[in-house]
Image (tube, rainbow, N blue to C red):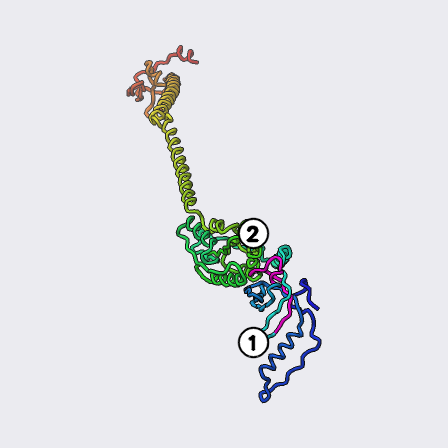
Amino acid sequence: MAQSPSQPAQEPAQQPARQPSKLQTSPEQPAPVRQIATLVAGWVDRLGAVWVEGQIAQLNRRPGTVFMTLRDPLADMSILVTCNRMVLDAADPPVVEGASVVVHGRPRFYANRGSLSLVADEIRTVGLGELLARLERRRQLLAAEGLFAPERKQRLPFLPGVIGVVTAQGSAAERDVVENARRRWPAVRFEPAYASMQGSFCAREVIEAVQRLDRMPGVDVIVVARGGGSVEDLLPFSDEGVVRAIATARTPVVSAIGHEQDSPILDLVADVRASTPTDAAKLLVPDVSEELQGVAQTRDRMRRQVTGLVQRELDRVAALRDRPCLADPHTMVTAREREVDELTARIRRRHGDRLDRGLDDVAHARARVRALSPLETLRRGYAVLQTADGHVVSSVDERDLGDMLTARVSDGRIRVRVEDLVHDHADAEEAR
């Protein structure tokens, strides 16, 4: 019973009726080649018809028979498919190289040539809706593994020294990346790693190119560039092997596949997605004219800032110099000098007044003291008699005739001798 296209292609459509018996051989009794080939052919015939899914790597149309190589997209394995020309022409849409197809046929081993092939009786091209559904399932599985997580993505260097380019040799995508990048930054260098950008060998060659560039120490960033195309043309860039190779790369990778509307899975795993190869060149290197303009603008802003700062300081210094105290420093000194003179004069007046009052007080006190002083009495003509030992003679009775006395007058002393003693009773009574 034939297998349905929706069932896994690896399972046979029917089981053999019985297991072949084991062939008994030995060095003394080996089996001839024809016997082995016949047995293999018999075992293959027992497999029956199967549905097989794959990608057409090569397509060779001949007048009666068509030869195709059916490749497994996820493994480096392929099988030869033969069919009648009418079988191929009956496929809708038409089968072309690189298309994903489902083939119904019977494996056959040709004993004479020792080759295995699949004789197809029906070929179905995988429809776009089914193809997109498969890609969506693959995208979900890879997203569940975290291959598209933002934290895995690397930042692009500001000015890479060497850019690795994975593209087809001489392609328009290569020219767009290289010419636009050099137009923006003429000193940038490129390390090309050419690969097929379409067909059955595209995925494998892209993986090898990315890994080779990733091992080069001088490569700072890798760009995978291809022009636009149909969904079938861009299938290799949704290949699981390509996606995993990009995810494990240590060098930042830029995806520049197709146009803005194209979105292979490679765009999701790459560190940066560019809508076109030209846009990739803009993302890879800065524009030297814009950078020079930015430097010039920054220099102008800095010059204006510095000039403005210096001018403000000059204005401040000028304002300080215009102040009276700085315009004529002697003005402040003169004003303070006048204040000092005024204060000095005031102090002198106050001290003079105080001294005058003090002198007056002293004069008055001196006059009072002088008025009470015995010398003033003596100056009025009085004299004080004193004995030799300094005692004052206050009565005639205290002395005898012939005593030597000293008469103290205002300006000196007079030595006198008592010649006579006369009592003046009237004066004594008046004194009492």
Give the residue at x 69% y 78%: 19
Question: Which element type, helix, strand or loop, lies under badge 1?
Answer: loop
The residue that disc 2 covers is 262
* Residue reaching furthest to the bottom: 28
Quarter that holds the N terminus: bottom right
Can residue 61 be seen here? yes
- Whether 416 is drawn above or below 94: the answer is above
| Percent position of residue 355, x then y | 37, 20
Quarter that holds the C terminus: top left
Question: Which element type, helix, strand or loop, lies under badge 2?
Answer: loop
Give the residue at x 40% y 33%: 312
Whole-angstrom CA distance, mark 2 to mark 1, is 45 Å
Q: Identify which amino acid the numbered label 2 is placed on.
A: Asp
- Whether 24 is drawn above or below 235: the answer is below
| Percent position of residue 237, x then y | 55, 58
Q: Identify which amino acid the numbered label 1 is placed on.
A: Arg
Q: How crowded is the residue under tag 1: few (<14 C-alpha within 10 Å), some, or many (20+)?
A: few
Q: How crowded is the residue under tag 2: few (<14 C-alpha within 10 Å), some, or many (20+)?
A: some
| Percent position of residue 136, x then y | 63, 56
Does the stretch in magenta take in 92?
yes
Residue 181 is marked as none
Query: Which contiguous range is marked in magenta?
Result: 88-108
- Left/right of residue 352 with respect to residue 222 in the rendered view: left
| Percent position of residue 219, x then y | 45, 58
Residue 113 is marked as 1
The numbered mark, 2 or 1, whose residue comes first in the sequence reads 1
